[in-house]
Image: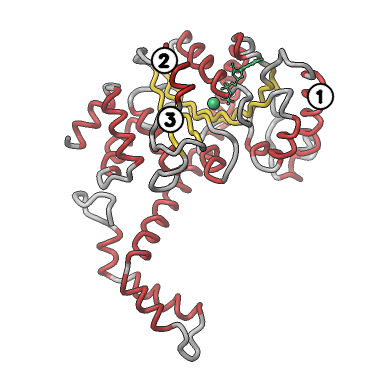
Amino acid sequence: MDINNLVKRIVAADKLSISRAISMIENNSPDSDNLLDGIHKYVGRALRIGVTGPPGVGKSTIVNELIAALRKRDKRVGVIAVDPSSIFCGGAILGDRIRMQKIGVDNGVFIRSMATRGCSGGLSRATVETADIIEASGKDYIIIETVGVGQSEVEIFRSVDAVVLVLSPESGDAIQAMKAGIMEIADVIVVNKADRPGLDAFVTNLKNTLELARPQSVPHLCGSSKAKIPVLTAQANAGIGIAELLDTLEKYLSGLKESGKLAQRRRDVLRERIKTHILTRLEEHLLSDKKITKLVDNEIGKAGATPGKIAQKALRVLINRKTRKVLIPSKKRGRGV
Ligand SMILES: Nc1nc2c(ncn2[C@@H]2O[C@H](COP(=O)(O)OP(=O)(O)O)[C@@H](O)[C@H]2O)c(=O)[nH]1
Ligand SMILES: [Mg+2]
């Protein structure tokens, strides 16, 4: 199918075309750059929310409830569930798929599972580009669920507008474990399973930890003038606390918008994306360039050939006219280099 046609169908929210486009992204198809160029003007309006936390705390349950709450407010929603344990690229996460089935027929919702192993290319790139495809089909919100581990997941969360960290009264140790990474990028924290024992102690402990981690009285010292992180409670399997979560998120996001911080954050994200794009291309080329490999091999061991000098020599060869053609492919050649 030609790309223009595919773009048209995506914009018309045709589910089959959206799925097909996402597969192209996941498989790093030669046409995916053209596809992403084609949908670009339909991207940038939706709000993106990351939902993370340890396994079993109720993230998927919360996401399901959020979908329902957003649909009630007449918002269209896209969901990407990133599953680190699944080995199939784009394969269904069975449990989630079954639970989410009742909304499967709703055209205002699109759900996609992504695996972290077996995908060609980086997970965070594939996830962000998948979010673009889904957004181009006219969604108001994009929700990305991941288990908060690993560098690529942290990268994903740097690309969204707001991060919700889900914990449960049982995830005491998780606080310590996650303090360093995810805690820092959480914008809202939900303590789910409020029906479980130990809720009050957990919330008090959590708030103390947050105070210690980011002393609010001296924001300049920790390099962030971020306001206090809201800590909410919920019982997602009974639908309790979801409307409050959504209200908090909407308030947070409109605050970001008004202060200009949202635009700033998105600019930063784009800059990073572009940088990654350039580096990926350079790396792909470098790894497949036999001339460079040979040059490096020949230089190694020569008298006076330091790693720095060899690298400089290789760079000089890399950045010449011919490589420029390879690195900046014509429209027809697409992503493949
Ligand atoms: N007791 C209790 N169980 C819940 C609550 N929310 C979700 N669960 C259950 O916790 C289990 C794990 O939920 P799930 O949403 O799959 O967690 P995830 O791994 O974080 O996505 C499921 O059996 C849910 O039904 C809650 O508020 N209270
Ligand atoms: Mg889940």
Residue carrying label 1 = 204
Of callouts 1 and 3, which one flags the residue occurring earlier in the amino acid sequence?
3
Identify which amino acid the numbered label 1 is placed on. Answer: Thr
In the image, residue 96 sits, relative to residue 267, either above or below, namely above
Of callouts 2 and 1, which one flags the residue occurring earlier in the amino acid sequence?
2
Q: The C terminus lies in which quarter of the figure?
A: bottom left
Q: The N terminus lies in which quarter of the figure?
A: top left
In the image, is the residue at mark 2 within 8 Å of ligand 1 by its beta carbon? no
Of callouts 3 and 2, which one flags the residue occurring earlier in the amino acid sequence?
2
Label 1 crowd (10 A; few <14 / some 14-19 / many >=20): few
The residue tagged with tag 1: helix, strand or loop? helix
Residue 290 in percent (x, y) is at 31, 71
Residues at marks 3 and 2, CA–CA distance in whole angstroms = 13 Å
The structure residue drawn at horizontal position 23% and vertical position 28%, both measured from the top left corner, is 8
In the image, residue 294 sits, relative to residue 54, either above or below, namely below
Q: Residue 165 carries which label?
A: none
Residues at marks 1 and 3, CA–CA distance in whole angstroms = 35 Å
Task: Using the rendered view, name the quadrant where residue 167 is placed.
Answer: top right
Residue 98 in percent (x, y) is at 44, 17
Label 3 crowd (10 A; few <14 / some 14-19 / many >=20): many
Residue carrying label 2 = 101
Residue 97 in percent (x, y) is at 44, 21
Residue 215 visible (yes or no): yes
The structure residue drawn at horizontal position 33% and vertical position 43%, both measured from the top left corner, is 27
Residue carrying label 3 = 113
The structure residue drawn at horizontal position 58% and vertical position 24%, both measured from the top left corner, is 59
Identify which amino acid the numbered label 2 is placed on. Answer: Gln
Mark 2 or 1: the one toward you: 2
Identify which amino acid the numbered label 3 is placed on. Answer: Ser
